[in-house]
Image: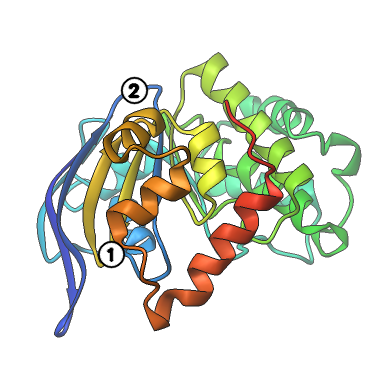
Amino acid sequence: MIQVEGLTKKFGDLTAVDNISFRVEKGEIFAFLGPNGAGKTTTIKMLTTLLKPTSGKMILDGYDPVKHQNEARRSFGIVFQDPSLDSELTAYENMEFHSVLYKVPRDVRKVRIKQLLEFVELWDRRNSQVKQFSGGMKRRLEIARGLLHTPKILFLDEPTLGLDPQTRNLIWGHIKSLNQEEKITVFFTTHYMEEAERVADRVAIIDYGKIIALGSPEELKNQTNSQSLEDAFLAFTGRRIRSEEASSIDFMRMNARMWGGRRR
């Protein structure tokens, strides 16, 4: 479903993404795990046509996102790291506006909106302004909006950042149900190692723009003789915390403890 070969992105002298290659199979839940500045968001922006790569090749559902932007965009939905809803509109109005932009047929639009708002448990709040919503409710609405045009791939950039563990569990419950029932491919970035370990079929550990390890959580733990993905991550990236990343790693550890060591 996703093919990436030799993908590189440079900003002047800075190489944000450095010659990475990977594949994501249809129906897979695939995670990019790494600290701030590792290249996760830059990779998603290239895959979703928001940035042009410096070099390399990408294919989404058979389309090159550089050469065939419109076709590629129809194949995916995306939930951005930063909020992108119109807070002055209601939940229903946000969904309706998005459906018009993606040219969802009028006779399909109302049914699809109702189905998705029910799916994320927001149908009862459809007429409430988004500015009245909690962070978790906004994330659920963004996920519903990203699915309106029935994409084959769902990109999630730090989808549960800043949310409490209970809300994260609820959101991932919805996403995993969607993955299992509709076989949608999920590509997500995260800081949360327990989240990646519990949810993803495979994990790519990225650091300094390079993919330094790739495999299932169990494979990564076995390769490093580790008991947890956190330990495997540190084995691959080095246990000495770099000053510019200290707060990011501490944040990961804190949230790993909050997840309480849950496993799939």
Residue reaching furthest to the top: 181
Q: Quadrant of the N terminus?
A: top left
Q: Quadrant of the C terminus?
A: top right
Residue on which disc 2 sits: 26
Can you tell which mark lies on residue 93? none
Q: Position of residue 53 (x, y in %)?
A: 17, 62
Give the vertical position of 194 relative to 262 (above or below).
below
Amino acid at the residue labelled 1: Leu
Residue on which disc 1 sits: 51
Q: Decide which of tag 2 and tag 1 comes sooner along the chain.
A: 2
Give the vertical position of 82 relative to 164 (above or below).
below
Residue 236 appears in the rendering: yes
Q: Nearer the viewer, residue 65 or 105?
A: 65
The answer to whether residue 41 is left or right of residue 46 is: right
- Quadrant housing residue 188: top left
- Quadrant housing residue 151: top left
Q: Position of residue 166 (x, y in %)?
A: 78, 43
Amino acid at the residue labelled 2: Lys
What residue is rendered at 67% in x and 30% in y? 173
Number of marks:
2
